[in-house]
Each structure stands twice: as structure tokens, then as C-alpha cells.
Image: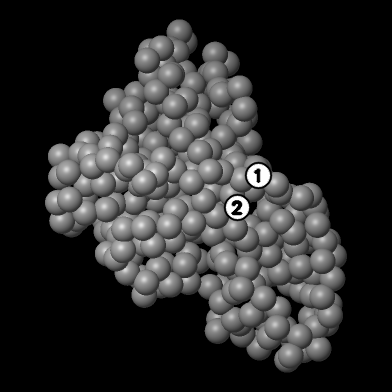
Amino acid sequence: MKIILAAPRGFCAGVVMAVQSLEQALRRFGPPVFVYHEIVHNRHVVQRFRAEGAVFVESVAEVPEGSVLLFSAHGVSPAVRQQARQRQLRTVDATCPLVTKVHREAQRYAEAGYTILLIGHAGHDEVVGTMGEEPQAMVLVQSAAEVERLEFPPDAKLAYLTQTTLSVDDTQRILTHLRSRFPQLEGPAKEDICYATQNRQEAVRQLCPQTQLVLVVGSRNSSNSQRLREIAVAAGVPAHRIDGVEELQAEWFQGVERVLVTAGASAPEEVVQECVDFLQREYGGQVESHTLREERMRFPLPRGLDLNCERGR
């Protein structure tokens, strides 16, 4: 069996920053450190930090007054920040800077009187936080079919933004429909889908013709991992998203000689390697790495980890 190992894969710069932020917060402040939602959407990462003293919460009300609260990579709304101030929490903001960019764009468009069409998935932590920036000015759009149901006057000031972890192809289809219906639609100078999401999708798209099976390492609630599997399926290649080696099933590999292995942006590399080791051990797999491009992006740790971090900030 040939194991085609896609690169780039796994942790992006935003995930690295968020994970390092929580590691540093646990060292500096000691457990418990509370985290608003999962630090990133990966079961292994969450389980590891839970064992080290992180406490993941769904509401600021769950955090004792005066405690340390870290905002996850997906970002939060201004209402959540206000609640944290009211409870006198010491906050650490590990929001990915690329998500922060979308929040700022939402603020700018709303202040200019635009109605903002946010392309994304309902209920995703990032979408909830972004819509919380300017809820009175935002309309969520999840599909091209939903575009047909939108009604705005011809002179309406409209702008679009997108969730950072979407399928590039699906987003383009929605945008094509939006621009067809609303020619006046404006958008950000630089697209919102993050570089890491695009790179991982393009690697799968390019390598699919060389493989008979695609394995995507990533958790069920990881949007970008789900998109990688969908891209492979759309290309006519059987594909499975797995949390780890324990989910591999023998029947997937019957008659398969070439397997593509990749990982979503929140999946740890050690989990990928466990899967590769299994394929080598059980099927005599030979690894062949394919690198689409190098990723050198790095984000600094947030200000909230400075030694002079103040309460209520």
C-alpha cells in the first residue's frame, strides 16, 4: 500500500496560538483555567487540556467571579466580553486573528449602514460570535437555495462576509448566486476563508486523482475537517473523517493500494502519525509525502498572557 501524506495538514497558525495560549495560562495562573467553548474543535486536544485542569464552559455564568477565562480560537461576541467584565474575570483572548478580521469587517459595514450577509453554518461557534458583533445588521446565508428566498430593495446597501473554515467551492457558488440577485453586493478586500483552510482543501483536490481512499483526521464538530471529506467525495473518491486510529475499519482497505491521509486544522500531528503507523504495520504501507506549499504564518500570544494582565480586561 502507498500512503500519500498530504501537506500542509493539521494545526494552522491560529490553532497553534490558541493551544499555546492555554498551555501558558495553565502554567502562569494554575488550574483551573476556564475556557469559553472548546479551545479548538478536536476531541484529543480538549481531553488533554481537561486532564491538565482546563474547564470548558458554555456560559460565562458558569465561571466563578475573579477566575481566569480564556476565549477560544473561534471568537466571542461583545455580549460575552461584557458578561466577563461584569463577573470581574481575568480574560485571555485566544481568538484567531483571521476571525478577528471578520469581526472588524462586520463592525465597519454595520457602521456604514450595510446589511451584512454572513455565509456560514448556523450554530458554529465562529458564526455565533461573528453574528453577535452586529446582530441587528446580519443575515445568515447557508446555501444557494437560501439566497433565492432573500428579499431586499434594489437600492439596499448589502455586503457579505464568510466563516473562515468553509468550502471554497461551496462559498463561491453561494457568492455567484448572491451577485446575480444583488449586483450591488460588496465584500472585503481580502477573502475571509483562511489560508490554511484553502491550502488543505487544495491539497486534497490535487491529490484525489492519485488515490483510491481518503482519510481525514479531525473531529466531528470540526467544520474544516468535514469540508475536506466532502471535497474528496465530490471528486468521486471514498472518504472517511476519523477522530483517530481506533475508528479505522478493515473493510475500508479491501482492494485499496493508495490511501491519501490528511488532517483538519485542529487535528494534532501525533494522531495523524498513529494512523500512518497503523497502516504501515497492518498493510505494509510506504509513505510518500506531497507538499502543496509551505506555511510559515505565526501569530503572537495574546496580550492577556502578559505578566501585568488586569482583571476585567
The structure residue drawn at horizontal position 66% and vertical position 88%, both measured from the top left corner, is 250
Residue 166 in percent (x, y) is at: 56, 45
Tell me, yes or no, whether the two marked residues, 2 and 1, touch with CB atoms within 8 Å: yes
- Write the residue at 57% across / 16% down: 183
Picture coordinates of residue 277, whole percent (x, y): 70, 83
Identify residue type, mark 1: Met
Numbered disc 2: secondary structure: loop
- Label 1 sits on residue: 297
> Can residue 313 be seen by looking at this rendering?
yes
Which is more toward the observer, 224 or 13? 13
- x, y percentage for residue 208? 78, 61
Q: Can you say whether 87 is above or below 283 in the image?
A: above
- Classify residue 33 as left or right of residue 192: left
Q: Which mark is residue 309?
A: none
Looking at the image, the residue that sits furthest to the bottom is 282
Q: Is residue 143 visible?
A: no
Cα distance, mark 2 to mark 1? Answer: 8 Å
Q: Point out the tag, 2 or 1, that comes first from the N-terminus.
A: 2
Snapshot quadrant of residue 198: top right
The extreme front residue here reads 307
Q: Position of residue 115 (x, y in %)?
A: 40, 20
Numbered mark located on residue 12 in the image = 2
Q: What is the three-letter code of the residue carrying label 2?
A: Cys
Query: At x 68% / y 52%, what residue is drawn?
Result: 201
